[in-house]
Amino acid sequence: MDLGLRGRRAIVTGGSKGIGRAITELLIAEGADVAICARGKEDLDATVADFSGRGPAIFGDSVDVTDPEEFPAWIESAVERLGGLDVLILNAAAKPAGQDDATWELTFQSDVMQHVRALRVARPHLGRSDAASVVAISSITALEAPIRPDQTAYGTVKAAMLSYSGKMARQMGGEGIRMNVVSPGVIEFPGGMWERYRQVMPAQVDEIAATTAVGRLGEAEEVANAVVFLASPRASYITGSSLRVDGGIVQAIDW
């Protein structure tokens, strides 16, 4: 299926590795020009180099999405270099372990204020697109009570981001801007948390995989497929929705 993204202009935060890299690669494959940011310059430069020369333009910059001045300025700069904006994908996240004030503050800045600040800058530009879309990446930890205590801040703040996204979908609908959320489950990719867990406790990882309805962990590309579809004009009547991509690990009935 042609998703109608050829020639579209997209921004992806946290776009250099894992799920963000998979999203970036699929956008490039669909013909979109892409600007990405991430904290780590080495991974960022490698991603840009890997995807350059495939036709669409790609560039990236090392940016801290929790910086209240640097991040909005980068969004504005990226839009200018892209020549406009059709798709905004907010994937960057901090996942510090702990329950102290610093953990809560960092998580809030990353997973709520990143979205608030990005939309302040991007919203007028998106409003000039004829197929504007925002997709935020949450997590099933926003939906589950039984998580590790040191992930309480992460799960709680992701839930706040879900609420914010729903409110913004309603507010921006009249401007022709859609906003949806994708909540990944247990996703394994090179260099990621679950790959590291598998190296030190493979039996426990297998046990967790067995609790999914499909009996395995997910892959970054499977999340990217859902994200890019929702971002595309093919999903033109979908907004204010929250989609789990978790292999059925959350045992809830959604229909």
Image (spheres, helix red, strand yellow):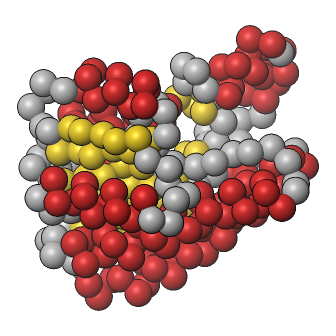
Residue 42 is situated, as x and y percent measured from the top left of the image, at 43, 24
Image side of residue 35 versus residue 141, left or right: left
Relative to 20, does residue 93 appear above or below in the rendering?
below
Observer able to see residue 235: no
Q: Which quadrant, please, contains the N terminus? A: top left
Name the image quarter holding residue 245.
Answer: top right
Image side of residue 35 versus residue 97, left or right: left
Q: Residue at x 83, y 15 (%)?
A: 201
Name the image quarter holding residue 129.
Answer: bottom left
Residue 193 is situated, as x and y percent measured from the top left of the image, at 67, 28
Q: Which quadrant, please, contains the C terminus? A: bottom right
Q: Residue at x 14, y 71 (%)?
A: 130
Front residue of 191/212: it is: 191
Observer able to see residue 207: yes
* Count of numbered tags: 0
Residue 10 is situated, as x and y percent measured from the top left of the image, at 25, 52
Seen as rendered, the residue at the extreme front is: 69
Relative to 177, does residue 174 appear above or below in the rendering?
below
Name the image quarter holding residue 26.
Answer: top left
Residue 139 is situated, as x and y percent measured from the top left of the image, at 63, 51
Front residue of 90/104: it is: 104
Q: Residue at x 24, y 45 (%)?
A: 34
Q: Residue at x 42, y 58 (%)?
A: 70
Relative to 72, does residue 99 appear above or below in the rendering?
above
